């Protein structure tokens, strides 16, 4: 059934902005994906080994903390996990995310500056879930 949520394919979100999380959740669910969202890095890390995690979306800044610190943890658990890093602080932060991701061995790292279009987000989600299905 189109639009039905598939808990076997879940997007894991690390972000502290409830409005942003809602928008991502709506887009993911419209693509048939389940969502787990948190603003806590330890909680996020605890979900990485859960079956069905198809992708991760990480904000660069979480209050007083850097979301980039979780990239090494993602790589240690699932270096092949499609991971999207987003930032409202410009290309410099996103370039730093790419460097950190490469240094840790993340194989499928993408970045998007905020605000971004839902079409860009859907492209990431489709690519992520196609990778898991392959």
Image (tube, rainbow, N blue to C red):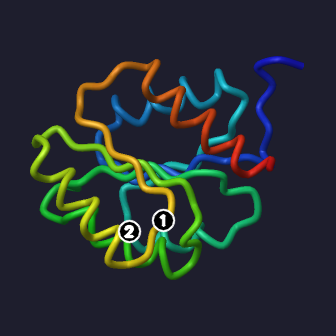
Position of 61 with respect to 134 (left or right) is: left
Position of 86 with respect to 83 (left or right) is: left
What residue sits right under mark 2 in the picture? 41
Residues at marks 1 and 2 touching, judged by CB atoms closer than 8 Å: yes
User: Residue 109 at x, y = what percent?
Assistant: 43, 55
Q: Residues within 10 Å of mark 2 (few under 14, many from 20)?
A: some
Position of 101 with respect to 90 (left or right) is: right
Q: Quadrant of residue 125?
A: top right
User: Residue 30 at x, y = what percent?
Assistant: 64, 21
Q: Residue at 35% across / 32% down in the picture?
A: 20
Q: Residue at 68% across / 40% down in the picture?
A: 34
Secondary structure type for disc 1: helix
Q: Residue at 72% across / 29% down in the picture?
A: 32
What residue sits right under mark 1 in the picture? 44
Measure the C-alpha gap from mark 1 to mark 2. Answer: 5 Å
- Asked if residue 37 is positioned above or below residue 123 in the image, the reply reads below
Q: Residue at 9% across / 51% down in the picture?
A: 92
Q: Quadrant of residue 111?
A: top left
């Amino acid at each position: 059934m189109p639009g039905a949520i598939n808990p076997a394919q879940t997007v894991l979100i690390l972000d502290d902005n409830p409005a942003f999380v809602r928008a991502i959740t709506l887009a993911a669910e419209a693509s048939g994906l389940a969502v787990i969202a948190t603003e806590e890095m330890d909680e996020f890390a605890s979900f990485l080994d859960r079956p069905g995690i198809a992708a991760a979306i990480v904000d660069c800044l979480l209050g007083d903390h850097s979301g980039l610190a979780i990239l090494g943890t993602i790589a240690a658990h699932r270096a092949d996990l499609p991971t999207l890093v987003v930032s409202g602080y410009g290309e410099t932060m996103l370039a730093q995310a790419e460097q950190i991701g490469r240094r840790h061995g993340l194989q499928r790292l993408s970045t998007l500056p905020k605000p971004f279009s839902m079409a860009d987000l859907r492209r990431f989600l489709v690519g992520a879930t196609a990778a898991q299905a392959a």
